[in-house]
Amino acid sequence: MSEEMTAVRKIVRDQTLSFKQKEHALAVQAENMLPYPLLDAETRAALDARIICDMYEGHAPYKPRYVLPDYAVVLSKGSAYLELPVPTTLDEAINTLMIAYHHVPSVTGMPVFIGHLDALLLPFCDGVSDDELYRKIKLFWRYLDRVLPDAFMHANIGPTDNRVARTILKVDAELKQIAPNLTFLYDPEVSGEDILRLCTDNIIACSKPHIANHPVHAATFDARGYAIVSCYNALPLCGGASTLTRINLKKVAEASADEADFLNVQLPRYVALNARLTRARVDYLHKQSGFFQSSFLVEEGWIERERFTAMFGIFAMAEAVNHLQAMAGKAGRYGHDSEANALGARISALLADLVAREPMDNVWRGAAMLHSQAGISSDAGVTPGVRIPYGEEPDPVSHVRALLPHHQHYASGVSEILTLDETVRGNPEAVFQLAKGALAMGFREFTANVAGNDLVRVTGFMIRLSDVKLYNEAKGSRTNTTSLGAEAAEVVGILGRKPRVVGLELAVGAVG
C-alpha cells in the first residue's frame, strides 16, 4: 500500500476524530497528493530544512488562508447566491450571519472572522429590550461554539461602549466557550475606561477578550478598515491573507558565523527565499485555483481580490538572540538583559525593512505584511514570535517593557500572553492598570491568561484544560483545536508558562 493510501486509511480509522474532523483531514490529504507549486532548488532546500515554512497550508492553494468578508454587505443588500433577503429584524440579521458563515472558507475549513458584531447588530436593536438582546446573543454564542467549534474563529467588538458589546462580554464570561475568540478594539478617545475595565474583568474570568490598540492598527490600514482574526492577525477588511509563510530565526542564527553574518548575510538571504515561497503560493491561488474568478463572495462584494495581502511570519526570536549572544561570549538572555533585548529590537527593525523591499504581485499594497507568528503545536524547542520563553517570564511590567520595542514593526500582528497569578482575582484593578498602561505605551495587543482558569490561551486560540484531559484519554473532542492544544502542551510546553503576580504598586504609573 502506498504511503498516501496508508495515511488516508489511518484518518478513516481514527476513532478520536468526529465525522467532520475526518472530512477535513481527508481533504487536506487529497490536496497534498498534488504536486507543490514550482520552486527553485534553493528555496525548496530551505523549505525542506524548515528554515522557511509554509505552515503546512497544502500543496495546491485553492482558497485564501484567511478571508475577512465585509458582512455589512449581506446585511444591507442580502445575497442573490444564497437567496437571502435584506434582514429587517435582529432575529433575521443573526440568522443571515449564521447562514453566511457556512460559505466563508479558510485554512481551517471554518470562518476565522465573523464580523465586527456590535457594529453589525446595533442597527437592528431598536425596540429590543436588554433581556431579549441577552437571550438572543446567548443562543447565537452557543450556536457558534457547537456548530463551528474552532477557536481560530474570531469576533471583533468596539471601539465604542455599546449595549451589544457589553452583552457579548457578559455572555462570553458566563459560557466560557473556546469559540468564538474575541477582540475588543480599544480607543482611549472613544471607548472609555468603564468598558476597558469590563474587558479586563472578563480576562480574569475566562482569559478573553484580546484587547487591540485600535488607533495603532487603524493607522496601519486604510479607511475601509481592518479586523483582528485567528491568532492576533490584523488584516484588511473585505480582503484577508492569501497565505502565511514564516522564517525560523533560531535556524538562521545557527547557520550564521556570528552576529554580523546573521544581520548582513544570512537573514537577508532567508528573507529573500521566504519571499520566493510566498510568491509561488500567491501566484497559484490567484492564477491557477480560480477562487477569485468563481467565488460569489467576490461577485457580491463581500470581499475584493485587491485587498488580500500575504503574511510574512517570524518565530524563535528568543532562541536566535540567545544563540547569537552565546556565540559572542555574552551571558545576557532575551527578555531579561538590556543588550540582548536591544539586539532583538534591531532584528525586528531589519526584518521590517527587508520584507518591505520584497515586491509582491497580487498582494495588497505590493508587499507582504510582517507578522510575529504565534507558532504551531509541533514547534519543539522554539518560542512563538518575539515572545519570552515559557518559564523564563519576568514580572509583568518588565515583560511589557522588554517586548514593547518590537510592536511597531509587526503590522499584521504581534502579541504576548501574560500569564498572571490567580491572586489577581482579588485585585482586578491591577489587570486594568497593566492593560491600560501597556496600550498607552504602544502595545498592539494586550492578552493575558489567569492561572486556575479551565479556559486558557495556547497561542491565539483557546482550549479548555478539561477537554485536553479527555482527549489525552483517547476520548476525542468535538472542538477542532483541542488536539492542537494537547500537542502544544506536550511538545512546546505551553503549560510551563510562569504565572506572575501583578500588584497595584507595580502597575499604576509604572508601565505608562
Image (tube, grey):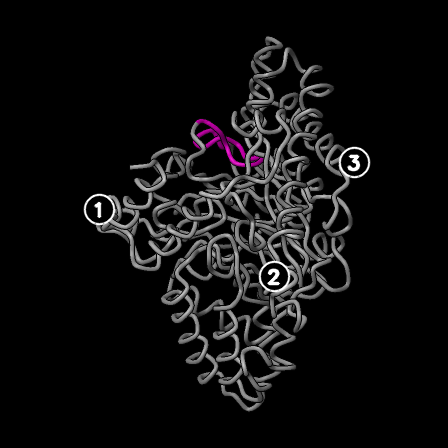
Where residue 191 appears, x then y in whole percent?
A: 65, 65
Q: In the drawing, what numbered circle is on residue 68?
A: 2
If you read the primary sequence from the N terminus, does the residue marked by circle 1 or circle 2 appear first? 2
Q: Secondary structure at mark 1?
A: loop
Are there few (<14), some (14-19), or many (20+) residues within 10 Å of tag 1?
few
Identify residue type, mark 1. Ala
State the extent of the magenta-drawn residues as a range: 381-393
Residue situated in front as seen by the camera: 116 or 273: 273
Residue situated in front as seen by the camera: 42 or 459: 42
512 horizontally vs 126: left or right: right
- Quadrant assignment, res 170: bottom left
CA separation in Å, label 1 and label 2 = 35 Å
- What residue is shown at x 40% (from left), y 49% (from top)? 456
Identify residue type, mark 3. Arg
Regarding residue 205, the answer to whether it shows in the image is: no
- Quadrant assignment, res 264: top right
Are there few (<14), some (14-19), or many (20+) residues within 10 Å of tag 3?
few
Q: In the drawing, what numbered circle is on residue 422?
A: none
Residue situated in front as seen by the camera: 409 or 274: 274
440 horizontally vs 106: left or right: right
Where residue 169 appears, x then y in whole percent?
A: 49, 67
Q: Magenta span: helix, strand or loop, mainly?
A: loop
- What residue is shown at x 57% (from left), y 25% (from top)? 45
Q: Which residue is mark 1?
A: 474
505 horizontally vs 138: left or right: right
If you read the primary sequence from the N terminus, does the residue marked by circle 2 or circle 3 appear first? 2
CA separation in Å, label 1 and label 3 = 48 Å
